[in-house]
Image (cartoon, rainbow, N blue to C red):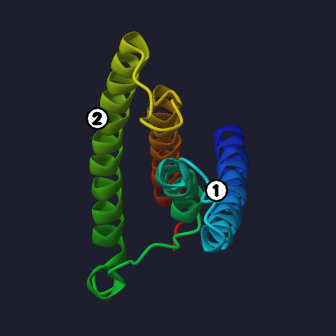
Amino acid sequence: MEWLSSNVLKLSKFLYGVSGFTLVVMMLLTVVDVALRLVGRPIAGVYELIGYFAAIVVGFALPFTTWTRGHIYMEFVIDKLPVRSRDVANVVTRIIGIALLMVVAYNLVDVGTVFYDTGEVSPTLQLPIYPFAWAIAFCCFVLSLVLVCDIVRIRGGEYE
């Protein structure tokens, strides 16, 4: 199981790096577009790109953020429980999260396949949409693996 944890962590860090890089590209693209608008030459399709890049930033950052527990966490309720009850609550919430993420990933793959089959593209830049749906579906799958690793850590007493 150590193999799974280390590889999931590496993959989560890689996705997090892609997320950070994409955020920088979004920022630069926005700054350049605003500057060019001042001289009457805006970049076509920036609105589309920012929307797609935002999906990448959020989706790709979720697995590592979850690994490091960087989300808002309502610990004031859970921490008052006895250790065994806390572990049960944490495992149950992880299982529910895995189930929900698998449903979301399945549906994103399905939607992406429809986009692929129909040749759906963005209105201005004519970019295919399906890679973005599939990429976020992949991130949901990786996030579910992070939750599996969480369950293993909880059961092993390594989770604080």
42 or 118, which is in the foreground?
A: 42
Residue 93 found in image quarter: bottom left
The relative height of residue 23 versus residue 43 in the rendered view (above or below) is below
135 or 71, which is in the foreground?
A: 135
36 or 46, which is in the foreground?
A: 36
Residue 116: image location, x then y, percent: 43, 16
Mark seen at residue 136: none
Judging by the rendered image, the residue that carries numbered circle 2 is 103
Label 2 or label 1, whichever lies nearer to me, is 1
The relative height of residue 113 versus residue 146 in the rendered view (above or below) is above
Residue 122: image location, x then y, percent: 44, 34
Q: Is residue 53 visible?
A: no
Residue sitting at 70 percent across and 51 percent down? 18
Judging by the rendered image, the residue that carries numbered circle 1 is 19
Tag 2: residue type?
A: Val
Q: Residues within 10 Å of mark 1 (few under 14, many from 20)?
A: many
